[in-house]
Amino acid sequence: MQANPETPCEFGDDFLDDLPYDPEVLMFDRLLEVDRDRSLVRCRMVTSLPLPLTSSQRAHPVRHPQHVAGGLIVHATGSLGFVHAYYVLGLRHRDGWIGYGTHIHKASFRRLIAPGEEVEGTCQAVRLGLGERRHFIRYRLELQRDGERCYQGEQSALWTRVDAPG
């Protein structure tokens, strides 16, 4: 497994080229920490507009303030799982590895995230079932702003290695 980059840093082209989605929907722009011993990654979340769903909100300062949509937060947790798989486990999409979320065990939205706020996302594997071609991983995920928890959850994903035909 290759050495991790010195953090904090922007994501490199190798990582961005390996994403199963276009980099514009990654939801993170900086890798802040990689700790293989603790099976943990930490990243800076992009919350500036325009954001899908969030930019379409009919905001009201009291009844419905503009905020990062919950659906984007769930998408962001999947992106954190990919960052974890890439930097902690060394899984590469280009080598046939792909992960899919299977369960959201817990999802607690603690406070709204306003567009433009600086948010840190943390993903830690709390249970690893590693096989030769299949990995089942349970993650603990958290989003924080200034040390205050905005989101906390636990999710599971199945990572499989698929050989390309022919």
Image (cartoon, rainbow, N blue to C red):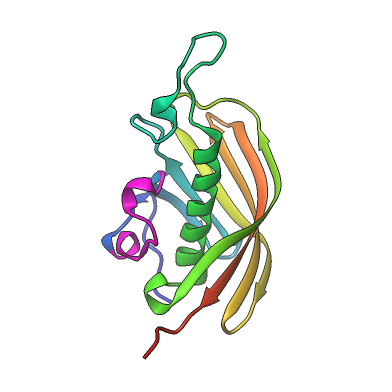
Residue extending furthest left? 13
Q: Position of residue 66 (x, y in %)?
A: 47, 20
Visible in this render: residue 100?
A: yes
Q: Position of residue 18 (x, y in %)?
A: 35, 65
Visible in this render: residue 116?
A: no
Left of 117 or right of it: where is 12?
Answer: left
Residue extending furthest top? 62
What residue is rendered at 54% in x and 48% in y?
A: 77
Left of 32 or right of it: where is 99?
Answer: right
Q: Position of residue 110 (x, y in %)?
A: 65, 29
Taking depth in this image into account, of 31 and 91 the one nearest to the observer is: 91
Picture quadrant of residue 143: top right
In this view, 106 is above or below 127? above
Residue bounds of the magenta highlight: 14-27
Q: Is residue 19 magenta?
A: yes
What residue is rendered at 43% in x and 77% in y?
A: 96
What residue is rendered at 41% in x and 33% in y?
A: 47
- For the C terminus, the image quarter is bottom left
Taking depth in this image into account, of 50 and 90 the one nearest to the observer is: 50
Q: Is residue 52 magenta?
A: no
Taking depth in this image into account, of 70 and 37 the one nearest to the observer is: 70
Q: Position of residue 156 (x, y in %)?
A: 65, 59
